[in-house]
Image (tube, rainbow, N blue to C red):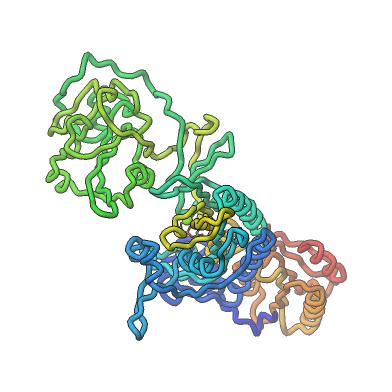
Amino acid sequence: MRFSSAFIFTTKEAPKDAVLPSHKYLVRGGFINQIASGIYNFLPLGKIVLEKIRNIVKDELDSSGCEEVQLGFITPCELWERSGRFSKYGKELLRFKDRKDNCFVLGPTHEEMMVELVKSKVRSYKQLPLNLYQIHIKFRDEARPRFGLLRGREFIMKDGYSFHSNEEDMKREYKLMEETYKKIFTKLGLDFRVVEADVGAIGGSGSKEFMVLADSGEDTIVVCKSCEYAANIEAAKREKRVPPTEAPEFSGFAKFHTPNVKTIDELSEFFHIHPYYLLKGVAKKAVFDDHEEIVVFFLRGDDELQEIKAANAIKANELVDVSEEELKENGIVPGFIGPFNLKAKFIIDEDLKGETSLICGANEKDYHLIGCDLTKLIALYADFASVKEGDKCPKCGGELTLKKGIEVGHIFQLGDRYSKPLNAMFLDENGKQKPFIMGTYGIGVSRLIAAIVEQHHDEKGCIWPMSVAPYSVDIIVSNIKDKEQFEFAKTVYDELLNKNVEVILDDRDERFGFKMKDFELIGFPYAIIVGKSLKDGKVQLVDRKTLNKEDFLKEDILDVILKRIR
Ligand code: ATP
Ligand code: MG
């Protein structure tokens, strides 16, 4: 490609709302441009990177026996009603009607469609297993589209669905997909972790996410320093905590006047007791399919509520905040909540099981109870405290640490969650009707472009790994009016093209510094600078990663560059 005729427009200005390097550089470097909130055009450079990622994903999936299809992006509402997701999905699901008043949605994911397709073709266990995938547009009307390609509304996803005659076979495929995904993300040059993920209120089956480590990541992941344990904070567990101090001793169970002592800090100071031995009550409104209800979650004073774990523990769809007024209306006294004689449903964190010497609210203004013995209470226990830095690993007892990650892939054991309501059945070995056992596997293909830049950039721009670089080599002609420079650059360019090297010739009539800045911003892995030293028979090779410049004899440059890129 000749730069002078390419549709590549770089700019100095980053979008006003851009805070992350990937967002800034992808727009400034002319990879993408924004049309509307969360909707982007892919320009030639962006499209090349997208296709390269796509091909790596496709190659690995095809080698693992998956087959590519492409389903309609728009799907009928009726399917979503049958699976029960039409009402549950919320505002992310964009619904509309056609001229004949038929209801449709812009596909945010395609379980329903894929089940419908397989149901219409497959009759017998003999036709199983199957793993069908597509790499195609999705639309989710995200509440807060942001960070460029990381959280768009329209984005490209690889979504795959496998169909099996039994659990065991589905688990085999799930393992295979985990291995396949690892190969894909390794080829993409990413530093990632496979983490245990939240499986939702239904729970049971397994789910793993693939997290690219990056400080800008929206997900928090818990990683063990000693073993391979890693989990999304929404699903992370820990060993029972070690008491930081000896348990306090109380003369008995008694009510204590604590005027205006409401927060854990105030309480800890008032009694000179470690927050570990204080009971913290967090009240939330739990939303269920058919009703809403206030639920109080009790934790140690120095633990925090993990809302996803908490919602799962009580099988709620979600937890929402509740105002002090609403609490008071329900007979709950904010600041003085405790599990004894509480006028609301409550549940206690597992780590507190067996505690006999705590302080908690008395459910009465300005009073707390001391010497609280939880074993005297009939209560539900579950794990819903958020794992924190320094907690102990549930697998090996090692130290846990927190990291930030970008979710680029997700694999999920679905079982018959969709096949059953959609009545998608096959005949098993005994001629009996059974619902398909399914797995589902996603990769954020367009998100990956941004995730790669988040891990591979410096203060000047992108640094593409060779496997996805838009061009491997940028030949920069320092002064385009210098015939000798241009002729030599053109010769190297032609020879590289002959060798099937992806090369771009920067033959624009611009200052050298300008062209160099574009090289750094766009992030081609190598540049060959054909400049003044050509007179002495030399050219320069620049490595984008290190920005090191090396002089080479002009007759050697072809061999050198071929060695570097292969
Ligand atoms: P997130 O938690 O980031 O919202 P999700 O768990 O809802 O994602 P999945 O339904 O698991 O997403 O979709 C599979 C993959 O699609 C995700 O792992 C992610 O890489 C990608 N993805 C999801 N939402 C978006 C989005 N709004 N923009 C870009 N990629 C996305
Ligand atoms: Mg996910």
Residue 450 visible to the viewer: no
Quarter-wise, where is residue 243 in the image? top left
Closer to the camera in the image, 187 or 209: 209
Residue located at (25% from left, 40% from top): 296
Q: Residue at left 44%, top 49%?
A: 199
Q: Which of 277 and 551 is in front in this view?
A: 277
Question: Horizontal placement of 250 versus 27: left or right?
Answer: left
Q: Where is residue 317 in the image (x, y as percent from the top left)?
A: 33, 52
> Looking at the picture, does residue 541 appear above or below residue 326?
below
Task: Look at 25% across and 42% down and name the residue there.
Answer: 295
The quarter of the rendered structure image containing the N terminus is bottom right
Callout count: 0
The answer to whether 111 appears left or right of 43 in the picture is: left
Vertical relation: 347 (above or below) 471: above
Work out which quarter of the rendered image holds the C terminus and state it: bottom right
Is residue 75 in sight in this rendering? yes
Drawn side of residue 161 relative to residue 39, left or right? right
Q: Where is residue 406 in the image (x, y as percent from the top left)?
A: 51, 55
User: Residue 15: horizontal and vertical position, in percent?
Assistant: 45, 70
Relative image position of residue 554 (x, y in whole percent): 84, 71
